[in-house]
């Protein structure tokens, strides 16, 4: 997985198409009108919003200077289910999130993950998932001139970093581990949304205001991976539990240059790893 990730990112960097997120900016509109346009564009592609997280309102209780920021988490559909079946680690970005933020006066930026990179990075090739990717791109293109938020740096090949913090728990059930992880997340001060079923994979979506503030004040486009993604999947002899690797966000523009943001990502990684270990998880790599 690490070799595939680095090779793919190198090829895309050379071709100029590398990006974590694809976004566009609506000008002269407020967040409410922008949200209505986005939901109409999603509906035109047959995509539905499962829940809307008013991240801006939540974080403003912590820091008043945080901009208006919405996260629209989509309902799992055929492309999501097919992707998770092909590679369970796609649960770190699925179901897709569309973010809206008003970080610039008089404008609302709308974005989602770039399927060309993310599905390619995670080895997703099936037709249904590729169609989902095409729909996500069509939503952005229908709203305005698209742009790709390209990384400012490449990950260190010597780091061995995977896109997922992955652990295996011997015995137990997926239902039991889901409840345990949710309890640990709450104990660590994260707000936990209702779990999402994607076939045999359960997605858990927590959020912490302090982390969101630091990340999105530095790089608002990071919303493609928010809320923070954990997942649980039954396997023979036990359960795999995992979460998105926070340090992946460090390659986004401006993040590595911000010491407070890097410190936050390191803290998030430490807390997330501790949570997965607290439920009995042992580090695991695919093929192990």
Image: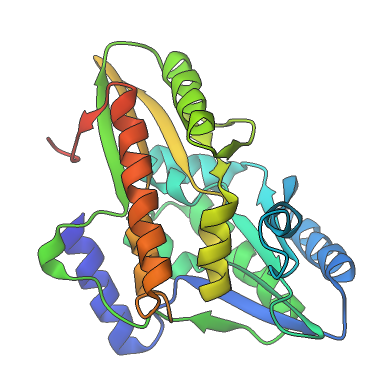
Q: Is residue 17 left or right of residue 14?
A: right
Residue 37 visible: yes
- Farthest residue, direction top: 172
Residue 120 visible: no
Q: Quadrant of the N terminus?
A: bottom left
Q: Is residue 119 above or below residue 94?
A: below
Which of the 4 image quarters holds residue 166?
A: top left
Which of the 4 image quarters holds residue 250?
A: bottom left
Q: Is residue 77 above or below residue 65?
A: above
Which of the 4 image quarters holds residue 233?
A: top left
User: How many callouts does the rendering have?
Assistant: 0
In the rendering, at what x and y percent does residue 262 appear?
36, 67
Protein image colouring: rainbow
Q: Residue at x 51, y 71 (%)?
A: 21
Q: Is residue 141 left or right of residue 223?
A: right
Q: Is residue 278 left or right of residue 135?
A: left
Q: Residue at x 59, y 30 (%)?
A: 195
Q: Is residue 259 above or below residue 62?
A: below
In the rendering, at what x and y percent does residue 158 appear?
10, 65
In the rendering, at what x and y percent does residue 275 appear?
37, 32
Q: Is residue 145 above or below residue 167?
A: below
In the rendering, at what x and y percent does residue 211 appear?
51, 56
Q: Residue at x 12, y 35 (%)?
A: 288
Question: 266 or 17, which is in the foreground?
Answer: 266
Q: Residue at x 44, y 69 (%)?
A: 116
């Amino acid at each position: 997985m690490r070799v595939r990730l680095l090779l793919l990112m190198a090829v895309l960097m050379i071709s100029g198409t590398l990006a974590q997120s694809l976004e566009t900016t609506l000008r002269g509109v407020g967040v409410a009108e922008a949200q209505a346009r986005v939901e109409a564009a999603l509906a035109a592609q047959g995509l539905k919003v499962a829940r809307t997280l008013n991240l801006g309102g939540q974080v403003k209780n912590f820091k008043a200077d945080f901009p208006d920021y919405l996260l629209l988490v989509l309902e799992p559909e055929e492309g999501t289910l097919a992707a998770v079946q092909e590679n369970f680690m796609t649960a770190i970005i699925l179901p897709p999130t569309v973010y809206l933020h008003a970080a610039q006066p008089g404008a609302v930026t709308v974005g989602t993950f770039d399927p060309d990179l993310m599905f390619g990075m995670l080895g997703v090739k099936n037709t249904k998932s590729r169609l989902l990717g095409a729909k996500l791109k069509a939503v952005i293109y229908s709203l305005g001139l698209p742009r790709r938020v390209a990384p400012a740096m490449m990950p260190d090949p010597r780091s061995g970093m995977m896109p997922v913090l992955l652990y295996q728990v011997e015995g137990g059930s997926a239902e039991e581990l889901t409840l345990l992880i949710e309890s640990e997340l709450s104990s660590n001060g994260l707000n936990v949304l209702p779990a999402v079923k994607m076939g045999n994979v359960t997605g858990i979506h927590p959020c912490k205001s302090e982390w969101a503030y630091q990340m999105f004040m530095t790089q608002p486009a990071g919303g493609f991976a928010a809320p923070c993604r954990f997942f649980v999947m039954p396997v023979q002899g036990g359960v795999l539990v995992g979460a998105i690797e926070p340090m992946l966000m460090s390659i986004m523009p401006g993040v590595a240059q911000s010491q407070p943001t890097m410190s936050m990502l390191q803290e998030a990684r430490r807390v997330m790893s501790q949570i997965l270990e607290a439920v009995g998880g042992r580090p695991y790599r695919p093929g192990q």
